[in-house]
Amino acid sequence: MKKFEVTYKRRLNSNMVWLKIYAPLVAKHAKPGQFIILRTDEYGERIPLTMAGHDEKDGTIDLIYAAVGRTTMLMDQLEVGDCLADVVGPLGKPTHMDGLKKVCVVGGGTGNALAYPLATGMKKAGVEVDMIEGFKTKELVILEDEFRAGVDRLYVVTDDGSYGEKAFTTDKLKQLIAEGNEYDEIVAVGPPMMMKFVCQIAQEHNIKSIASLTAYMIDGTGMCGGCRCNIGGEDKFVCVDGPEFDGSLVDWDELIRRSNYYKDQEAEDRAHVCRLTGGVRYHD
Amino acid sequence: MINLVREKNPMPEQAPDVRNKNFLEVARGYTEDMAVREAMRCLKCRKRPCMSGCPVMVKIPDFIAKVAEGEFEEAYKIISETSSLPAICGRVCPQETQCEGKCVHGKKGEPVAIGRLERFVADWHAANFGDEEIKPAQSNGHKVAVIGAGPAGLACAGDLINKGYDVTVFESLHKTGGVLVYGIPQFRLPKEIVAAEVAKLEAKGVKFVTDAIVGRAMTVDELMKEEGFESVFIGTGAGLPAFMNIPGENLLGVCSANEYLTRINLMKAYLPEYDTPIQHAKNIAVVGGGNVAMDAARCAKRMGAENVYIIYRRSAEEIPARAEEIHHAVEEGIDFRYLTNPVAVKGTEDGHVCGIECVKMQLGEPDASGRRRPVEIKDSNFVLDVDCVIMAIGTKLNTLILDTTENLEANAKGGIGTNEEAATNRPGIFAGGDAVTGAATVIKAMGAGKVAAAGIDEYLSK
């Protein structure tokens, strides 16, 4: 097996892909909630991705991503046997599970891929887990069978009602709380806007909330400071202090603003990938 | 014969208004003739004060004497006895506070240009003997791990491989070189030089493992207990960038110098074929007065900024950057605002930087560092219109290795605790460079790497 070789590829829906990558150093120490940084080739960016799982025996890690940026679009071109240039990790602090009895994990869209190791890992650690999977529409639903097998109760909701219940994740969460479920913690993994509202609901009910944040970063060891965010009035680095933080302390508006910083440059890059080269670099 | 000219032979350089638009090396290097003439300025003092200023004790008068005789390869051999990376040191050492600061010539004129001569000798060797075959050293069978492929780690690995150790270097980034590749810009230290030094070490038998974060993918204890490393050197560098904790610091367009420089130097944001995003600001304020601030400001100019300001709270007397960097920055059009301190970053409604509010300072009584303490002048606030702010005010220590290594003790500053032989409280574990001292210089890190190599050799020879 070559370093960082793709050993498995499965298309989950029109834009989401599940890859297994051979990275034994990472797989040996990976824990739920941790992430890696990868680079597709010499000219690529370093992007962080939360691991969707790992297998120490095979030396592989699982990455589930939506092809929405230049790097993930380039990754979309990879087939089994191809290699990434770099994979470094595991990074960040693992999910905190000690002392928890019952939690609700709320995943939005792509975030469900990241919620998967977290929710099933908690269940394995003896925590009772309710899982809310939320998607825009039926076609985007992923990992339903996997979740059903790995948590206590799974609720699938779609914005348009084309699959599961017609509801937003926040509505479903409110309903579960109203029905008398007593959670020690609510974990939000998904778009920042969804996480903001999930954490607000938790706060209204005096339940502790945890949000798994993503941010721009380069090295992942605290050296660049690009991922800093305001947590309870203090600057924290997502890469070394996170990626999970107390949701009630996150400055969501700042986080949302910062996560869109390079949006314009990225839109331009994307156009170059899909229109000009179809994903193939012109200088290779 | 001694050349009695009081000034250094000038260094050929790219013209300021040309070089501030490209990333090619600024200083082009001495010709053979210039080097010989400069070497002849050396007075061959019996007490050799210059050597006492060198952290790795290069036999300066000896190598300079060989340059004066035109025996450049002999000069290279003399430098190589004590310095692992002369092509790098000749370019980035703060000579004015080290070897050249002690030169007797400096009392009545300019010191001998020791740094330029060192660079000349190293470059001459690379050009004329660079492709010579390097034989792997005879192995003594002892396995040593070096953590961090920066100046401390490379110097340590170089000395250990020469002594026959089986050396593996673990690097967290995808490229080797540490601050030499992510921090110091191409125009000051071409990355090809760093790559050549690493290739030399590889040819001698040093193994490099990139993308390997010790403390995450493996621990120091695992390296020793499971992987069979008998000794470990920790040279992981300084770590986390400091911010000022002033309002507006998380606005879009504020970043650390580490981030800005890494995007440009490691991730090559200045080359169109790389994907790395970077801010193309028009007016940039760089806060700080060290070499890192100069590097960031000069990069900013090259990235197309119209106005680049250095904001420094003390005066030109106290500024810590190398004299040459300041001189070059001024020539390239960087606007120095001394005795000025930021109090807030100003933003637009959508959260982008639109200015930096500063206050004027004056110098008061000397503080603990012996420098006069800057004091705010009341009601002197003003706003400088900028759309990007780069913070270059130093770093805090990264505690990853301390947190993940059993019973490893910290020093008073929070770095890894060591004795004078670079040994930590744990037998077999050594440390050096910025990970111990906090942010310092490349040559000091190399010196620490060499001290540790000697300590490891002694430890494993017992």
Image: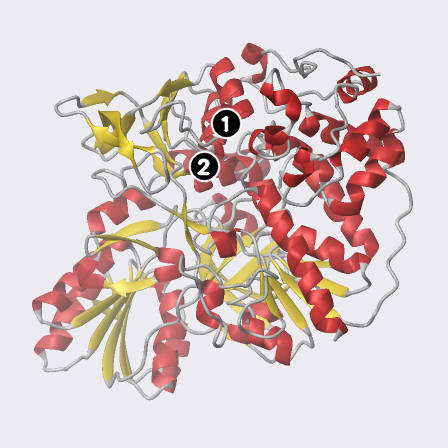
Task: Tell me what residue is drawn at x 60 percent, y 80 percent.
Answer: A57
Q: Secondary structure at mark 1?
A: helix
Neighbourhood count class around disc 1 (C-alpha, 10 Å): few under 14, some 14–19, many 20 upward? many
What amino acid is found at the position of numbered circle 1 in the picture? Answer: Cys
Name above or below for residue B370 compared with residue B133: above
Spot occupied by residue B237 in the image (x, y as percentages of width and height): 52, 52
Task: Tell me what residue is drawn at x 34 percent, y 31 percent.
Answer: B389
Spot occupied by residue B352 in the image (x, y as percentages of width and height): 27, 32
Q: Chain of mark 2?
A: B
Q: Can residue A262 be seen at all in this image of the molecule?
A: no
B189 sits left or right of B343 in the view: right
Q: Nearer the viewer, residue A138 or B349?
A: B349
Q: Nearer the viewer, residue A23 or B59?
A: B59
Circle 2/circle 1 CB separation < 8 Å: yes
Name above or below for residue B205 compared with residue B345: below
Q: Secondary structure at mark 2?
A: helix
Spot occupied by residue A252 in the image (x, y as percentages of width and height): 21, 51
What amino acid is found at the position of numbered circle 2 in the picture? Answer: Tyr
Q: Chain of mark 1?
A: B
Task: Tell me what residue is drawn at x 45 percent, y 37 percent.
Answer: B260
Name above or below for residue A205 compared with residue A253: below
Can you identify the residue that label 2 sits on? B260
B167 sits left or right of B126 in the view: left
> What mark, if any, has residue B299 been given in the picture?
1
Q: Nearer the viewer, residue A116 or A92?
A: A92
Task: Tell me what residue is drawn at x 89 percent, y 28 percent.
Answer: B71
> What mark, if any, has residue B234 been given in the picture?
none
Q: Can residue B282 be seen at all in this image of the molecule?
A: yes
